[in-house]
Image (cartoon, helix red, strand yellow):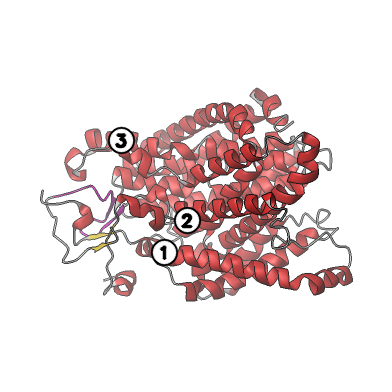
Amino acid sequence: MSKVETDFSGRFAVRRSSRWSELWRKEDWWAIWLGLGIVVIGLVLFAHGGSWRWVAVVPPKWTSLAQLGAHFADNWPRYVVQFLLWGAAFSVALTALGLKAREFLPAFAFVYLLSVAVIVLGQWDRANYYNLEPPLVALVLGLVIANVIGLPRWLDAGFRVEFYIKTGIVLLGATLPFTLIIWAGPIAIFQASIVSIVTFSVIYWVGLKLGLDRRLAATLGAGGAVCGVSAAIAIAGAVGAKKDDAPIAITLVILWAIVMIFVLPFVAHALHLPAGVAGAWIGTSEFADAAGFAAAQTYGGFAGQNSIAGNADQSVFAFTLMKVVGRDVWIGIWAFILAIVASTRWEKRALGRKANAAEIWWRFPKFVIGFIAASLLVTWVTSGYSLADFNKIVNPGLIAPIKDLRTWAFIFCFLSIGLTTRFREFARAGNKPFLAFSSGVAVNVVLGFILSAWVFASHWANLTQ
Amino acid sequence: MKGTCRACLHFRNDPAYLEAIFQGLNVMSSAWASVVAEDGLCLRHDRYLSAEASCPDFTAASSVTSDA
């Protein structure tokens, strides 16, 4: 019996969920409840002349330690309240998911203090000069702590990468006009579909040529083509992969995703790509939402300087449209199609089940519903304002505080990526899976660049204008 | 075939268990994510399967937690 089996003996490992229990048993739904809850409260406060502003405090730009010290001396209660609110909200959600709040809260306190330090560093007036972009600083800091210093395993309770990023994405929806989703969404879906189908085909074909099992090749292909680790684990289940297949895909996706967090923004910067174009390229060629947001937000920090056209929003919005709307939402369809293939052509008897179209819904990344709902809600409520009033009243009172809360959620996520990435614990991938996956990476990056920077360049460069 | 994996003694789909078995799953995804559905690990065949799958080796679990 393995150590994990021993650890879990005495408690039920099999859980049966009613269909409705998804609403409180799945992280995606809790990201919706938290994200939309913040947005709705923000709208109510705004309607009564209030705002999230007091709670949504962030360290200001600073040039001297004295200036920074004065800010914290004046504003420390705001940080305490913000920490307590985040901690309480996440604790309720994670407790419902079956995790322990008493383990989460100390770990989250650690994440929050590190996040304050990362944002403070990013606000230093010399930060750009030294390339101290907060997403990269958070990632590197987390990686160093996890791999050089080491942390006790129980602290993982506070490093919920996906929960933080999904909550942040729902908040991002509130700052992204719904009209932009309608206008840019179809191009994003078209571009992402081309790249996803080609990338999957390349990885799958190279994998088979190298002699990999079809189920492993499909798991690797989905990891590279659709939404990284999430796609790999979804397809592994849909096709009935071997126990070792998913860990191989997880290792390869994480390694390449971390490489791309650094490579894509700096190559785009060297090529002086406009912010929207770079965001679209990152959305096409990064492998996981969390990693992609780190890269896109990093590039957003370059925008408007050193001859990089555009603004930070364009980079993040283009990435979001491409990755979330263009790629993530199709995972259920990929799973359904591959389940049909696996159960009718690969091994009809071994899987013992028929593919069910309902799988498209059950595997649908539900947080996208929250993202769309937040966008629709805020766009509808603020549609009566003129542009001048929007900039003067709505933006500072409603949009900017939500944006700042989103920044916190994203920094929690970027830190958690580093803090949970323990290279020595990953499964060994092997040369053949590495070659198959890397072939897809190479094609994906080149094709993504051609489509983003040449074919649809003007579309992405002019996003939000 | 007598039942699906969901009710089988050999099937494990507790999210905490899956994250412990699949090192790195929590780095850029989560066992609590919707995309995972109710998939789990079959200890009998060392396969990662849908809870709807079934096979001749099905053995009813003595108890299965339910939050229905």
In front of the other: A107 or B24: A107
What is the CA distance from the residue labelled 3 to the residue labelled 2? 25 Å
Q: Which residue is mark 3?
A: A357
**Magenta stretch bounds:** B39-55
* The magenta stretch spans residue B40: yes
Expressed as whole percent of the image width and height from the top left, the position of residue A355 reads 26, 37
Which residue is tagged 1?
Answer: A96
Mark 3 and 2 residues: CB-CB less than 8 Å, in contact? no
Foreground of the two, A390 or A300:
A390
Q: Which label is found at residue A30?
A: 2
Callout 1 crowding tier (Cα within 10 Å): few <14, some 14–19, many ≥20? some
- Chain at numbered mark 2: A
Give the main secondary structure, helix, strand or loop, of the magenta stretch: loop
Is B64 displayed left or right of A28 in the figure? left
The earlier-in-sequence mark between 1 and 2 is 2
- Label 3: how many residues lie within 10 Å, few (<14), some (14-19) or many (20+)? some
Q: Amino acid at mark 3?
A: Ala
Identity of the residue drawn at 21% across and 44% down = A351
Mark 2 secondary-structure assignment: helix
Q: Vertical placement of A35 versus A64: above or below? A: above
Tell me the kind of residue under disc 1: Ala
- Quadrant for residue A175, please give it: top right
Nearer the observer, disc 3 or disc 2? 2
Q: Nearer the viewer, residue B10 or A146?
A: B10
* Side of A404 where A187 appears, left or right: left
Most extreme residue toward the top is A455
Q: Is residue A425 visible?
A: no
Tell which subunit mark 1 falls on.
A
**Labels 1, 3: one chain:** yes
